[in-house]
Image (spheres, helix red, strand yellow):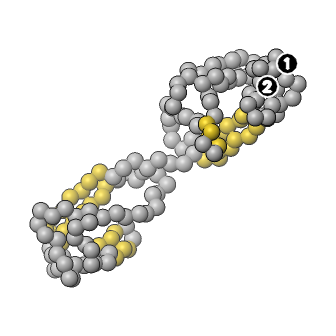
Amino acid sequence: QGSLRRTQPQCGGNMMWWYLEEETLPAEDIVKFLVQLKNPADTPTINLFQVRQVKPDGTRRASRMVQGYDIIPELENVTLTKAMVLPLGQCRTVVPIQATAPCFAVGSRTALVFTFTPTRPAQLFTVQGEVNGDVFDFTKAVFNEPVGTMLVPTARSA
């Protein structure tokens, strides 16, 4: 948008630059461009972006350092498996029969095992589930933690 319409940027290492030959950056004009790139695996210790305007001889005309953004790392070793255990009670609330096998049918209560390795310390993690626009309802989930005791999560609608 604005300037930089006829100049192709060049890139190398951790820099990109424009040699303006057929256009200039007018004073007080807003320069805006989009760059798509791959984030690093983690937020850098020194997390700054430097923007400089220089003359053809390399003399600095103006510059500014701006704070970068936090990189959200991926969890490692994430797995989700169906637990081969009996549910706590019956498979379906409308069928008052105690389950004798794990429940996997549509509308049944089932048991899932999530495992993952955090890459940073945290005080909150969330799980959401969706298949073809249908969301999993965790508002009535029951946890066995530790095994043999029940922990009912605080319900909150998304």
Residue 103 lies, with reference to residue 65, above or below; the image says: above
Q: Residues within 10 Å of mark 1 (few under 14, many from 20)?
A: few
Residue 42 lies, with reference to residue 29, above or below; the image says: above
Coordinates of residue 144 in the picture (x, y in percent): 70, 23
Which of the two residues, 115 or 104, is positioned nearer the viewer here?
Answer: 104
Task: Give the labeled residue for mark 1.
Answer: 97
Q: Residue furthest left?
A: 27
Pointers 1 and 2 in contact (C-beta within 8 Å): yes
Task: Give the labeled residue for mark 2.
Answer: 91
Dot 1 or dot 2, earlier in sequence: 2
Q: Secondary structure at mark 1?
A: loop
* Marks 1/2: CA–CA distance: 8 Å
Amino acid, disc 2: Cys
Coordinates of residue 93 in the picture (x, y in percent): 75, 20
Q: Secondary structure at mark 2?
A: loop
Q: Residue furthest right?
A: 100
In the image, what residue occupies the spot 69% across and 41% down?
80
Coordinates of residue 29 in the picture (x, y in percent): 15, 64
Quadrant of the image containing the N terminus: bottom left
In the image, what residue occupies the spot 71% across and 35% down?
113
Coordinates of residue 31 in the picture (x, y in percent): 22, 64
* Residue 4 seen in render: yes
Which of the two residues, 132 or 66, is positioned nearer the viewer here?
Answer: 132
Q: Quadrant of residue 135?
A: top right
Amino acid, disc 1: Ile
Q: Quadrant of residue 90?
A: top right
In the image, what residue occupies the spot 43% across and 50% down?
71
In the displayed structure, does residue 80 sit left or right of residue 51?
Answer: right
Q: Residue furthest front?
A: 94
